[in-house]
Image (tube, rainbow, N blue to C red):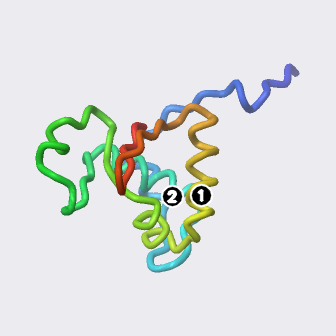
Amino acid sequence: MKHIPKENIKVSLSVGFLASLQDRHNERYSKHEAFCYLLDKACEHYMPKAVSKEMADELKDFQFVTTKTQLAEDWHWHRATVRTFLDALESFGLLERTKLNKSVIITM
């Protein structure tokens, strides 16, 4: 039987399915839950209230605006852990970040 390297496998899943796998609230998120969170925010074009309406109109498909601090609070992680996780996702080509003054645009 031929071995297929894991890094060559591509999987297509619905965001709804991934969200259904989340079962913890008000606890530290797993990496899987954090990734599902990012997908959900990207699908809804999430925008903090502090960001201008003009910025909201400029967002493209699968983009949203957030801060490392907000992600750390929501996921119950340290900001350094958030940064490391986002760096890893970016290295796998799963997201791109565009830095703004006090926030970041994430493209999934």
Q: For the residue marked with disc 1, what is the amino acid?
A: Lys
Badge 1 marks a residue whose secondary structure is helix
Badge 2 marks a residue whose secondary structure is helix
Residue in the image at 41% along x and 39% along y: 98
The residue carrying mark 2 is 34
Residue in the image at 45% along x and 76% along y: 25
92 displayed left or right of 63: right
Q: Are marks 2 and 1 in contact (CB under 8 Å)?
A: yes
| Whole-percent x, y for residue 94 in the image | 53, 36
Count how many numbered circles sit on residues in the image. Answer: 2
Q: Nearer the viewer, residue 43 or 71?
A: 71
Q: Which quadrant, please, contains the C terminus?
A: top left
Q: For the residue marked with disc 2, what is the amino acid?
A: Ala
Q: Which quadrant, please, contains the N terminus?
A: top right
Between marks 2 and 1, how big is the CA–CA gap? Answer: 5 Å
How many residues crowd mark 1 within 10 Å: few (<14), some (14–19), many (20+)? few
Q: Nearer the viewer, residue 32 or 48?
A: 48
Residue in the image at 52% along x and 74% along y: 76
| Whole-percent x, y for residue 78 in the image | 58, 70
Q: Is residue 64 above or below residue 50?
A: above
How many residues crowd mark 2 within 10 Å: few (<14), some (14–19), many (20+)? many
Q: Nearer the viewer, residue 70 or 14?
A: 70
| Whole-percent x, y for residue 62 in the image | 33, 37
* View extreme (top): residue: 2
Q: Nearer the viewer, residue 15 or 97?
A: 97
Q: Is residue 101 above or below residue 82?
A: above
The residue carrying mark 1 is 31
Q: Which mark is residue 58?
A: none
Residue in the image at 52% along x and 78% along y: 27
Q: Is residue 103 above or below residue 2?
A: below
* View extreme (left): residue: 53
| Whole-percent x, y for residue 73 in the image | 45, 73
